[in-house]
Amino acid sequence: ANRSFHPEDSRFDIGGGLIGGGAFAVMAGPCSVESEEQVLEVAKRVKKSGATFLRGGAFKPRTSPYSFQGMGLDGLELLLLAKAETGLPIVSEIMSTEYLDEFVEKVDIIQVGARNMQNFAMLTELGKCNKPILLKRGMCATIEEWLMSAEYIMKEGNEEVILCERGIRTFETFTRNTLDLSAIPAIKKKSHLPIVVDPSHSTGMWWMVESMAKAAVAAGADGLMIEVHNAPEAALCDGAQSLKPDKFDQLMDTLEKYTQLE
Ligand code: PEP
Ligand code: MN
């Protein structure tokens, strides 16, 4: 991951969606896949607004075991339907290696969530597969620890790692997490890997998403991951931080002035 081995910024072409080396990516979609209607509706809307990837959780790492845990493999099938309708490549989170073959076959980017950033056994397995990995920063991880987790994947031969800053836990409780914008220049200095920012999980509030998205672009991020839901008030997960499709559309109009979406 160290820039000294690779002075140029890495750029990946993932199912037609480019990221890194000047190409800006927007990964948008619901926190969780909830139904065919929901995911198709959100996918069509975000595609129309200019998103370059569809995100959607099928396996959800919920704090409470009594909360909705995701649709599992059925959720992956619905994401594939949405991909067939829109052409958007898919990003979805893996929770264990149990369904690794299904993930490799079905999704375009495998997401490792904050809670699994140091699941070294899983990172090693992901390093052996030929599939880009979105590695979210652990909620209490230093930049060095985060880059070492990227090394666990790359060491096995998989060099397509995208980093995602999603906020870290601090003494502040107003926001869900504290977005560490300084991670962007820090990662750019140390590494050639692309870095995207998730203004949804880092703030926890939909009305903060636009400011933080703009700030991430200004700080040099290679992309954004944004939660969008057609009916946030009824969402099974993370409704409070999800943008409605209209609001996402306005945000994309604003961002277009500053980014190069390819
Ligand atoms: C998510 O992207 O839905 C998610 C669970 O994020 P994080 O791992 O950053 O909490
Ligand atoms: Mn979420």
Image: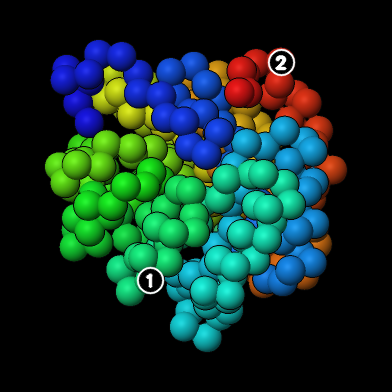
Q: Which of 234 and 30 lies nearest the eye of the viewer?
A: 30
Residue corresponding to mark 2? 257
The residue shown at (25%, 42%) is 158
Where's ligand 2: which quadrant? bottom right
User: Which mark is nearer the camera, 2 or 1?
Assistant: 1
Q: Is residue 257 above or below residue 247?
A: above
Q: CA distance from mark 2 to mark 1?
A: 40 Å
Q: At which x and y percent is residue 245?
A: 80, 47
The residue shown at (74%, 52%) is 85
Quarter of the picture holding the C terminus: top right
Q: Which secondary structure, mark 2? A: loop
Q: Amino acid at mark 2?
A: Lys
Q: At which x and y percent is residue 147?
A: 24, 38
Is 42 placed left or right of 185 in the picture?
A: right
Q: Mark 2: few, some, or many residues within 10 Å (few <14, many ≥20)?
A: few
Q: Which of 103 and 34 lies nearest the eye of the viewer?
A: 103
Q: At which x and y percent is residue 17?
A: 55, 33
Q: At which x and y percent is residue 143?
A: 27, 37
Q: Is residue 23 above or below residue 50?
A: above
The residue shown at (48%, 79%) is 64
Numbered circles on residues, count: 2
Is 41 placed left or right of 193 in the picture?
A: right
User: Is residue 144 among the parts visible in the rendering?
Assistant: yes
Residue corresponding to mark 1? 99
Quarter of the picture holding the N terminus: top left
Q: Which secondary structure, mark 1? A: helix
The residue shown at (62%, 36%) is 52
Nearest to N terminus: mark 2 or mark 1 = 1
Is 191 placed left or right of 95 in the picture?
A: left
